[in-house]
Amino acid sequence: MNALVFYFFAGLAVGSAILMVTRRDPLHAAMCMASALLATAGIFLQLGAEFLFIVQIFLLVGAVMALFVFVARSLDFEAGKIRRKTGRRWAVAGILGIIVAGQMWFAIAAGRTSLRLPEMQANIAPQNTEAVGNALFHSLVVPFGITSVLLLVTMIGVTLMWNRRA
Amino acid sequence: MLSIDHYLALSAVLFAVGVVGVLARRNVMVVLMSILLILNAVNLNLAAFSRLHGTADGQAFAIFVMATAAAEAAVGLGIIVAFFRNRGTVDLEEMDLLKW
Amino acid sequence: MDSFGLISLPAAVPSALSAMGAVLALPLLVAYTAFIERRIAEAMDERARPVTPGALGLLRYVARIARVGLGQDEGQAELRRRIFAMAPAIALVAALIGYAVMPVGPAFQVADPNVGLLFILGLGALGIYGVLLRGEASAGGRIAMDFVNHAAQVVSCQAAAALGLLSGVLLAGSLAMGQIVQAQLDQGQWFIFYVPAGFFIYFVGSMAAMNRATAELPAADADLFSVDALADATLPAPFYVLADYVSVIVVAGIATTVFLGGWLRPMASFRDRVPGTTIEILDIVPVVAALGLALFWYRRVRSHRTEMQKKAAATASGICAFVGLALGISLFVSAAVMAAVHGAFWFGLKVGGYIYCFVWVRFTLLQVERERLMRQLWRIVIPVGFVNLITTAMAVVGTQDTGLPMRLTTIAATVATLGAGVWLAKYAGSEAEMQAAEGE
């Protein structure tokens, strides 16, 4: 059952990701990306990371991808505007992608024997949200503060940028 | 029966697809989305290892990655909109000037 | 199935039953919500009465919803329908699933994940796609842009509403919906009395997010797309209307759970029993009230003149009698049945009251145009939400550290929030007006 859930979401994620990269219309690409993110959220849930699951839906799918759709709409550029030949780019990118995937494949295969990782823990922490909160606010409180400053700076920067343009 | 390798392999595939997207596409929005996909693949790794070790630290790190991804998307889209208003295109290859 | 997150298998059977109940009941409730909204509008606003023939038109609404469910939407033939056909489904499903984690009484809850509240809010965020793609599926151009702006408004309003909710979460110390209700039972107080400012912020934010009482296009929508118009003309996507009303019910359910004590009855900690039995005294009150109302309406049946009024009174009497009998009989069956029936009753009553307030405000207060709403949202409501969050957190910590009663610390927090709100409304509000004048 667990494996079934995993394979379903994994297939969905990879399929949507490939569609995302190949669609020409950025709006379609954004929808495929949202689907890929949702599929990943499903895998988070299957891993027992409930808080991550919900943040993924809330933040990435609900906010970030909606922002993409929003911008894709409001720019209103012609989808097929960029139509010069891109065959070489694709060829190079494909080769590089295969190389990257091969390297990681090799790393995983090598790590399997040399690292001797333990088996997956069977049980999940029943209070996943609390566990994440504890980690965030105890051992990782400094990175947490830095991240919040980063977000604040981002907000101010984007607001300034928009106001100047308008 | 599901081992960590499954998650790592999936993450690697997503990562590679993201890399291909970044390199092959010329629409800046899709490039941004591909970067998001790469970060997402990293998150998958973090969550899987967090489960493997039975601690929540990895998930907390994934939260940081998500926050950074959101910030990146906001700034990136802001730049894209500004660029589009100036040049009327979102073609990556048109972005060849540091100042205009 | 040991590790698949939210639901464990043995617990899934009652969960599945509850889920089926919710999926079947909600569209019906939508019909009644729409109907009641029209009636309240009629009474308050002196709007034209919707044409409601036969048995109060109630059954007709049910039939219409069924027709909508089976419906043929011929309106969008020429549109980009291949990908956007799913837009209404997204809107409706996102709204419907929210009820999966809603505790409708101690017995009726499909699942109680420890991120329950965030789950509902996340689904609300997914509903954005319904709005965005709805614009996409409409004629495009100007209208599509209107929907994009509307989506931006919904996002902002949801941010404000979530800020309001967080104060309740702080008090409960949990995001699980069941735990939040339990915390209110343990602390002997509904959270609305601890954080009235949070409730108010949620009310304003959620109302603005609900297409209610706001921007011109959705406002006209509510009239054009009312359930009456729905079945008669084949409008583009009747599912949107369903989704809108379902999300009203979901929003009311969230407010009920977080601030109004969920399925708890008023004075839930007063547990004195009738001597010699296991029946609590206060549980008799709703039974008596419902039966009394039934009697009252029954007498009105005779005094009313027109056929319409007679039917209305008879229906009301019948409903009250049914509720009263159900509540009364459940008292004698068993403690579990009693808790379930009474819990569902109180939950429904509170949700109904909340929706009533929604409609009430919608038809009495001035309608605000979108720019003004957004400006005040970001300049006043959201900052006040942050102030409220911080002061509530200080109140909770203060109670834990010093042992002061929660009542005292939360009153201090509320006063501080109110002060900030007044100051902001004076300062930021006036500045906003100034800038608006400047812009013109």
Image: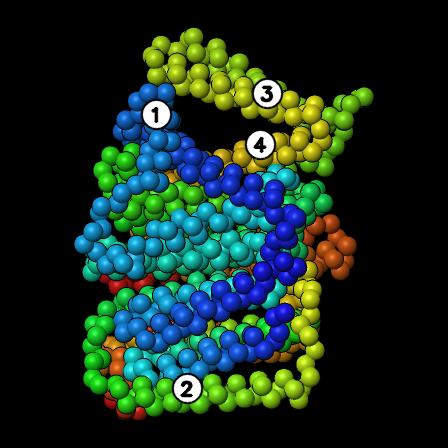
Quarter of the C terminus of chain C within the rendering: bottom left
Q: In this view, does C219 lie above or below C439?
A: above
Kind of residue indicated by mark 3: Leu
Q: What secondary structure is marked by label 3?
A: helix
Residue C260 percent across, percent down from the top left: 58, 42
Q: Which of marks 3 and 1 is nearer the N terminus?
A: 1
Give the CA separation, mark 3 to mark 1: 25 Å
Question: Which dot, 2 or 4, sits closer to the camera?
Answer: 2
Identified by mark 2, the residue type is Gly
The residue lying at 46 percent from left, 77 percent from top is B14
Disc 2 from disc 3: Cα separation = 69 Å
Tag 2 near tag 3, CB within 8 Å = no
Q: How far is disc 1 from disc 4 in space, using C-alphas?
A: 24 Å
- Measured from the top left, where is residue A70 in percent x and y? 33, 65
Q: How crowded is mark 2: few (under 14 residues within 10 Å), some or many (20 or more)?
A: many
- In the picture of the structure, the residue carrying the numbered disc 4 is C345
Q: What residue type is labelled 1?
A: Gly
Q: Which residue is drawn at 46% across and 20% down?
A: C316
A22 relative to C15, above or below: below
Q: Residue C124: in sight, yes or no? A: yes
